Amino acid sequence: MAGKKQHFIPQALIRGFSSNGTQVYQYRKGKSKPIVSAIKNVAAERCFYGEEDCFTDVKITDYENSSSTLLHQLQSGKLPDNRHAIASFVYLHLIRTRNIRLSINNVAKQIQKDFAKSITPNRFIEELKIKLHNDPEYALESFRKKCAERGKIPTRNQELAFLNILRDNIDTFIEISDAETFVSKSITIFSELDINVAQNAQNKVIPEIIDKTTDHKNKLKGIINNLEWEIIQFAENIILGDSAVIAGESLKKFALPIEKAAKMKFIFMPITSTSVLLGKLDFTQKIQAKQFNHMSASISQEFFISSKKVSKKLSAAIGLNSGFETNFDIEKYRSNFKL
């Protein structure tokens, strides 16, 4: 239900990993032992998508109500005929989670941090001077705005005169305005800003997924729509991670779909404590419960299980080693950066 406590994993899905329907064993990043938690309190944050009854959370609540039949059908071991309904269900689960938000924001923070380190006030000023010389319209925008504030529209001759004065006296203007100090302070402020890029992205994409208006050029959605689905049953317990497992070239190479969507071959989404929904392009792919648990724990910030008995092989993935590791090519970013 929409409100201030907003779930990023549906409670109906978590119940499939509970032995009593109300509680679940919860593992968290940095903790080696599980805690018993009420399902209503896990995989949720206060105002995760926005304020109480915000548009995105209301949309998700309505979708969960309308897709409950689909989830129950999957949990009973049956595949519905509507393949696209399955794709939307899985895609929404991927996009809405806290884990993907942390991963996206980590990338944004890294860009922010590396940009602040790579740009110096002197370099910024030199690049600005080049920009003003090569792109007169860039300088004229502010000139026209100032004129408009005074109720005037500059003539073309006035604009050219302004540009000539600016070019001839740019060094003096920079010195008088103490631009170097201003730029230095601006870079410091920028590097310390808390930018939540992912929440804005989620609040844009989630309603589009639900309303089926997602851009057809979305590579990840296109791949998920083309997957063939089956339900795999296991004899032992599996875990529910806070992100579905996206696999690329092999079982050992799985990562954020945003970065490696073109290499995605299969996706695993747990639906009960003994079954996984598998979407695949690689029709020869086989998996065991222990393999799945290891992958799911490795990429999750937290995960849930109906029993405390977890394979010892998971020890390397539980705790501090869990959570997405996102690689960002800052050198490529720098080479493409233009003021």
Image (tube, grey):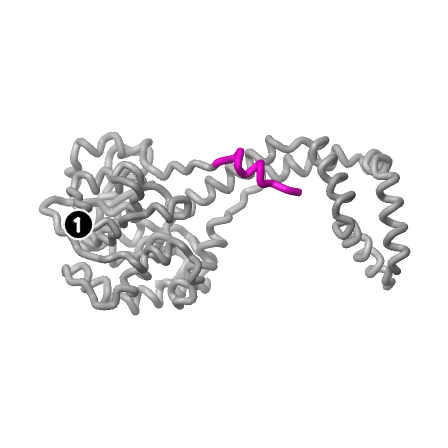
Q: In which quadrant will I find the C terminus?
A: top right
| Residue 165 quadrant | top right
Where residue 17 appears, as percent x and y from the top left, is 20, 50
| Residue 207 is at least partly visible in this image | no
Where residue 31 appears, as percent x and y from the top left, is 30, 34
Q: Does residue 316 belong to the magenta stretch?
A: no
289 in relation to 89, above or below:
above
| Residue 80 quadrant | bottom left
249 in relation to 119, above or below:
below
Look at label 1 and name its amino acid: Ser
Where residue 160 appears, as percent x and y from the top left, is 87, 52
Front position in the image: 315 or 172 = 172
What residue span does the magenta drawing correspond to?
329-339
Q: Residue at x 36, y 58 (%)?
A: 222
Q: Residue at x 15, y 42 (%)?
A: 288
Q: Which residue is mark 1?
A: 273
Q: Give the side of residue 55 with respect to residue 123, left or right.
A: left
Q: Give the side of residue 126 with respect to residue 224, left or right.
A: right
Q: Give the side of residue 110 with respect to residue 176, left or right.
A: left
Q: Residue at x 27, y 50 (%)?
A: 267
Q: Secondary structure at mark 1?
A: loop
Kindly report the secondary structure that dominates the magenta region of the rendered protein.
helix
Front position in the image: 139 or 26 = 139
Q: Residue at x 90, y 56 (%)?
A: 157
53 in relation to 278, above or below:
below
Q: In which quadrant will I find the N terminus?
A: bottom left
